[in-house]
Image (cartoon, rainbow, N blue to C red):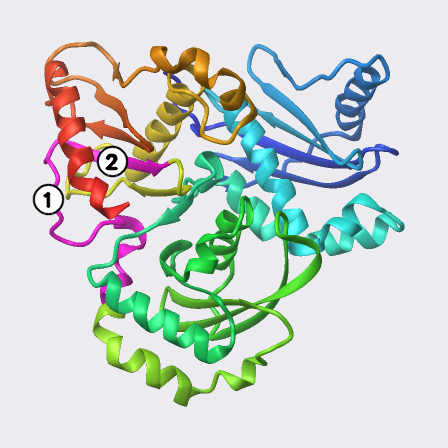
């Protein structure tokens, strides 16, 4: 299995579909932004072959060369996105979902009307600069995984019910039904209305907050790609503790100045200790002391119906492999099992067509051994699905292959009450 995200270059191109005029190009190498840009002739050729296929009523969606994977996707017959990846093991599934997230980010910060009715290309180019930071975070080596799973990255706070009660009370006092607590781009707690936000905004909003530079307070105009793509809302954020932000989604009211320190103190001062306990959860996701087998080096738990996930590569103090390497292994394994073994996520077109025919053929468990299948060598990866929950584990080389299924099943049972 290739290690998706290893040293390689990713180029993202955005063009106006009708004219082929490039709107922006973003590049990333080895997980970090790169200055290297594609020549205009290459951009023109990539767009030209896609347009040539469309004129012949042929939809060109992807292609592979010896060392590069290319994926094309058009949105509303107005915007064409092209991604090229020379990363080892880069998958079409990952790149297709990347393009969906990128377009969602463009709608979130610019609005669908500006993208589907392009009146002034130069003005649109300037407006799209606001989305660069968010888009670059998708291309880089992020600690989040919602861009791939299309589920909201979450953490499990030690005193979730206390925080939930404070959040609901504060949101009601502020005059909005949409509120959440976000730590490092992951949702700690949210109101019922916030959880009902559609895809992709449910993933994009906390990711946006996590990608922005630290700030005490923000009043940020956003469009909801699913719920309100043409009418902007206001995203208000308030930093409660370093790394922990309170987010409100609202209309013209309340003004940010109305959320004065007295209102904040009334609701959040009494729960200061539970809030402090949330700050270290950004990378760990699970509360300190949660019992996990010592062989577990990383895990990804998905609730496919709620569209939420827990993702951590720091469940223990073991040093090797590095967190970056663990994330790459789990992301690559998720791509493999999603594209090959497990059925599509609920709600997809493929699922609706083939659900009845394939129900008896759905696998429950699959595993992969990275490296020689000998004791003490390589890494073990196992995936198990029970009902709406799917668990992927990265395990140390010491874990025997015959124990993978039992360990994964036991861990899923322990984690299920959390998500």
On whether residue 281 falls in the magenta region, the answer is yes
Nearer to us of marks 1 and 2 is: 1
Q: CA distance from mark 1 to mark 2?
A: 14 Å
Residue 101 position within the rendered picture, expressed as x and y whole percent measured from the top left: 57, 40
Q: Quadrant of the N terminus?
A: top left
Which of disc 2 and disc 1 is earlier in sequence?
A: 1
In the image, 177 versus 211, the foreground residue is 177
As drawn, is 279 to the left or to the right of 237?
left
Residue 165 position within the rendered picture, expressed as x and y whole percent measured from the top left: 31, 70
In the image, 248 versus 197, the foreground residue is 197
As drawn, is 244 to the left or to the right of 354?
left
| Residue that protrudes farthest toward the front in the picture | 356
* Mark 2, residue position: 298
Can residue 210 be seen in the rendering of this structure? no
- Among the 4 quarters of the image, the one containing residue 27: top right
Q: Residue at x 36, y 65 (%)?
A: 244
As drawn, is 274 to the left or to the right of 352?
left
On whether residue 242 falls in the magenta region, the answer is no
* Mark 1, residue position: 291
Q: Residues within 10 Å of mark 1 (few under 14, many from 20)?
A: few
Q: Residues within 10 Å of mark 2 (few under 14, many from 20)?
A: many
Q: Quadrant of the C terminus?
A: top left
Q: Which residues are magenta?
A: 277-303
Q: Residue at x 60, y 36 (%)?
A: 100
Residue 233 position within the rendered picture, expressed as x and y whole percent measured from the top left: 63, 64
Image height of 279 relative to 61, above or below: below
Image height of 331 relative to 216, above or below: above
């Amino acid at each position: 299995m290739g290690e998706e995200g290893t040293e390689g270059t990713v180029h993202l191109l955005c063009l106006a579909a009708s004219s082929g005029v490039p709107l922006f190009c973003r590049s990333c190498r080895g997980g970090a932004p790169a200055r290297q840009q594609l020549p205009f002739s290459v951009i023109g050729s990539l767009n030209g072959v896609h347009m040539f296929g469309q004129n012949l009523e042929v939809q060109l969606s992807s292609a592979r060369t010896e060392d590069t994977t290319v994926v094309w996707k058009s949105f509303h017959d107005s915007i064409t996105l092209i991604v090229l990846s020379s990363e080892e093991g880069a998958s079409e599934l990952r790149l297709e979902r990347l393009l969906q997230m990128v377009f969602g980010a463009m709608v979130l910060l610019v609005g669908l009307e500006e993208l589907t009715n392009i009146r002034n290309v130069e003005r649109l180019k300037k407006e799209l600069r606001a989305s660069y930071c968010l888009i670059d975070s998708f291309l880089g080596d992020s600690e989040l995984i919602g861009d791939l799973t299309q589920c909201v990255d979450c953490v499990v706070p030690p005193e979730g019910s206390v925080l939930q009660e404070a959040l609901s009370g504060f949101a009601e006092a502020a005059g909005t039904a949409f509120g959440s607590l976000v730590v490092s781009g992951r949702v700690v707690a949210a109101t019922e209305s916030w959880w009902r936000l559609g895809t992709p905004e449910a993933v994009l909003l906390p990711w946006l907050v996590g990608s922005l530079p630290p700030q005490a307070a923000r009043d940020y105009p956003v469009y909801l790609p699913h719920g309100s793509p043409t009418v902007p809302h206001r995203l208000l954020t308030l930093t409660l503790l370093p790394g922990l932000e309170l987010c409100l989604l609202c209309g013209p009211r309340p003004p940010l100045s109305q959320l004065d320190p007295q209102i904040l103190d009334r609701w959040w001062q009494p729960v200061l200790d539970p809030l402090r306990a949330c700050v270290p959860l950004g990378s760990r996701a699970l509360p300190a002391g949660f019992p996990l087998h010592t062989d577990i080096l990383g895990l990804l738990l998905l609730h496919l119906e709620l569209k939420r996930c827990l993702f951590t590569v720091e469940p223990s103090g073991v040093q090797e492999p590095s967190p970056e390497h663990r994330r790459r292994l789990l992301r690559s394994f998720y791509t493999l099992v999603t594209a090959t073994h497990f059925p599509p996520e609920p709600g997809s077109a493929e699922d609706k067509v083939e659900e009845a025919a394939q129900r008896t053929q759905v696998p429950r468990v699959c595993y992969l051994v990275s490296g020689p299948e000998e004791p003490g060598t390589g890494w073990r990866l196992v995936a198990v699905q029970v009902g709406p929950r799917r668990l992927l584990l990265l395990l140390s080389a010491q874990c025997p292959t015959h124990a993978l299924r039992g360990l994964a099943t036991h861990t899923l049972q322990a984690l299920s009450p959390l998500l």
